Structures are given as structure tokens and as C-alpha cells.
Amino acid sequence: MKASTLSIISTALAADNTIKEADRSRVLAVCQAQAADDLLTIREAAKMCRVSHRTMERYVHEEKIPSVLSCGKRMVSSTEVQLFRSGNGTATAK
């Protein structure tokens, strides 16, 4: 993803007052992760969090950790995984 595309997405998110700030940040983090090839497979994320592949799939399914579909694979941002591991991610907020 090009920097100009990220800028357009950022501007659009800022203009939409129905989106919460935390959600804006997460959308931008995922976009930036895709731009930086910073996406992890569910299996890689599970390894980082020291949980089973199935547990990570459940977290994603329950939307406890945000994910995107990229090239037919479910992926998570490494930033989100780090937030999750530190206790500041979505999983601990629910």
C-alpha cells in the first residue's frame, strides 16, 4: 500500500465522526502493517502469544484480536499481537 493511500484512508477515517478513536487507530495500524509487510498468520501470532493455533483462531473469531483477510489467509497485525501480549489489546478490554 502506498503512502498516498494511507493518507487518504487516514483522512477519511478522521472525517467520519461515527468511528471511535480506538477503532481509527486499529484500522490505520492494520493498513500500515500491510504496507510494511508486518502481517502475521494466525499460526505465527499464536506462537508469539504462546497459545495454541486453535486458541488464536478463537480470539480472532470472537474479535478479541483484529484481523484482515489477505490473499485468502486470515492475518493479524504484529502491532495488535504486541498490544495483546502486553495486556493493552482488544482481548483484555472485553
Image: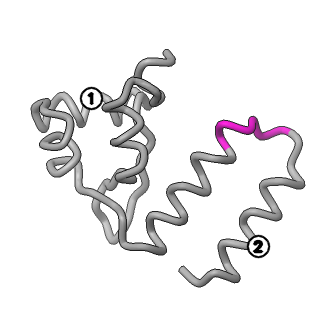
Q: Residue type at mark 2: give it.
A: Ile
Measured along the vertical axis of the image, is residue 33 above or below residue 90? below
Q: Which residues are magenta?
A: 18-23
Write down the residue under mark 2: 8
Residue pictured at 31% horizontal, 65% vertical: 72
Q: Nearer the viewer, residue 18 or 88?
A: 88
Residue pictured at 43% horizontal, 54% vertical: 68
Q: Nearer the viewer, residue 69 or 39?
A: 39
N-terminal of the pair, mark 2 or mark 1, is 2
Write down the residue under mark 1: 58
Q: Decide whether residue 22 is among the magenta residues.
A: yes
Q: Decide whether residue 55 is among the magenta residues.
A: no
- Classify residue 85 as left or right of residue 54: right
- Classify residue 51 as left or right of residue 32: left
Measured along the vertical axis of the image, is residue 51 above or below residue 44? above
Residue 82: x, y in percent? 35, 41
Residue 69: x, y in percent? 39, 59
Res 29 label: none
Residue pictured at 26% horizontal, 29% vertical: 58
Residue pictured at 23% horizontal, 46% vertical: 45
When asked about the image quadrant of residue 70, the answer is: bottom left
Residue 60: x, y in percent? 34, 36
Residue 8: x, y in percent? 76, 73
Q: Residue type at mark 1: give it.
A: Arg
- As measured in the structure, the alpha-carbon distance from the residue carrying label 2 to the one carrying label 1 is 32 Å
When asked about the image quadrant of residue 34, the answer is: bottom left
Q: Single out the mark in the foreground, 2 or 1.
A: 2
Mark 1 Cα shell of 10 Å, populated few (<14), some (14-19), many (≥20): few
- Classify residue 28 as left or right of residue 18: left
Measured along the vertical axis of the image, is residue 90 above or below residue 45? above
Q: Nearer the viewer, residue 55 or 36?
A: 36
